Image (cartoon, helix red, strand yellow):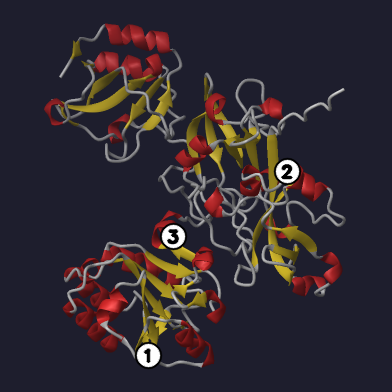
Amino acid sequence: MPHSALLAQPHLSVITGDADPELARIQELLEHKVVVGGRGELEELLGRLLGANAPPTPKTLDLIGHSTPDLSVLAIGAWAIDAASATVRAFFRELADLEVLPRLGIRAVRLLGCETAGTAAGRATICKLSEILGAPVLGTRQMLSAAHYDARGLKDECRHALVSSDELRGERDPGAPVGSSGASPYPRLLDIDALPSSPLAAHPPPWPRRIATAAIARDLLRLVRRAAGAEMPGLLDAPSCELALPSSKPGWYHAAHVLRDGELLRFYPDGTHRPGVVYPVDDPRALRELLDRLPAITA
Amino acid sequence: MTKPKPSPPTRSIFYGFGAWVGRLDGRTACAWWADDPSNLGFDHGQLIKTDLAKNPAAYLAGSISIDQLEVDDAPAGGGLTKLGPTWPTGSTINSVWLESNFYDHLPRRPAFPQPFMNCRGYELTTIIEWAPDGKSVHRRFWGFHCEITAEQGPLALCTVWTPGTSQTQKPTGSWWIDLAAHADPIANGFTTAGTGAAPKQGAVFLDAFGTRGLALAAPKVPPYQGGQLLPLPKR
């Protein structure tokens, strides 16, 4: 089959050559496909396709075969696509380095075998390959047979059988101790000395900043319920001001955001790249009065 | 005299079940067991007939009435029914979320929650609140087990369990949540925990905004199935 015809299809179907009756039926069904015996032949195929200099029509690279009985990862010939293997990672890294997928118009790779996303090894492979290739990689969560295919490849109506690397990255083991946002399972204590600090010039805020003296900082912190800290997802309120609380290092300060008219203070114990931890203020009015005693500095 | 116009539906409630398909009756119709059939002696008398096409998407498309709803949507539609969706290629062991009236009228209702789930029923419950005209989804709520340990006005410091794990796992995280903005009100009869005089432990049904912020996995039904993050975006 001419390479240009192969590359013009929405799916570049590459099927393993060691065909048992079921795979043979799939081979018969597919109108446009290439049969390969393993990694070497796949590499050669991709090289030949690049040489065709065909326009990069958007498509998926469908690798079709059986999954291995132990890890349920896809096998093309004797080559098991298991990202735990350094040679497998190296193969896909080379594809990424040479930008093979974008040059061929391949937007996603689909590992079409039975339950290729059904095991931890399978899911790890899907995520790792996606990370290496910088493109979505999809696996399956069920058995696949010839009934799932037509002349164009995997039937559109069977796409529900697929799970993508994006979805897998979003999944979490419910037994894991913390949520995906990294939230602590229990409320967090405020330990002022454990907070990160920096010179004032390091992070000039877009809102007014009030610099507390050590004495006023103590009074402010007395108003905070220090055992009731937690993230507050979706809190879009801009702070009314930033409090700079002196640290033990001269000239360095801990930052806190005053939210909701002093009802809440937000600290960043894990650094500003992580979500802040919100603490309630027992007496917002007293906090506001203390804030009024501090000069506001606008950047 | 004109016949009174029926008022539009306000809510639809769905309960999550693990399902083992025992018979295919059509492209979207099947009959399933609510337990591993090995435990039931493959007794066809215990099969539950369900048409997976009778879902909210079909209702919104006008192909069925609200009374004909049987199951929640597939993930692509924002629901968690992963059984099927079409035969013979669909998934035969997976989750099916039954509409509450359909469940209530089953000749042999399976236990809810199923004994193998080890969680509270509300963790396997989702609510669709229809728009006032009944022709679109206004909000969707998901049930969580929650303990409230502090309050600040309408905000509650909520310790939350990943749905489906409250009786076997530690909590997943603690968050300040504006329950007035993002939880189904206690008056509606589903949320039981809240601020003020309300109990401090129990069910909290959160909308998509509140749920997205927690980024928790959906319940795994049956337990060995994979999970997905809540809420499920419509594709």
- Residue B184 at x, y percent in the picture: 62, 31
Residue at the location (35% across, 27% down)?
Answer: A266
Residue at the location (64% across, 72% down)?
Answer: B88
Observer-side mark, 2 or 3, equals 2
Labels 3 and 1 share a subunit: yes
Residue carrying label 1: A78
Q: From mark 3 to mark 1, how far is it between C-alphas?
A: 26 Å
- Residue B187 at x, y percent in the picture: 70, 25
Residue carrying label 3: A168
Q: Which mark is residue B65?
A: 2
Helix, strand or loop status at disc 3: helix
Helix, strand or loop status at disc 2: loop
Labels 2 and 3 share a subunit: no
Q: Which mark is residue A112?
A: none
Labels 2 and 1 share a subunit: no
Q: How many marks?
A: 3
Residue B69 appears in the rendering? yes
Residue at the location (55% across, 45% down)?
Answer: B171
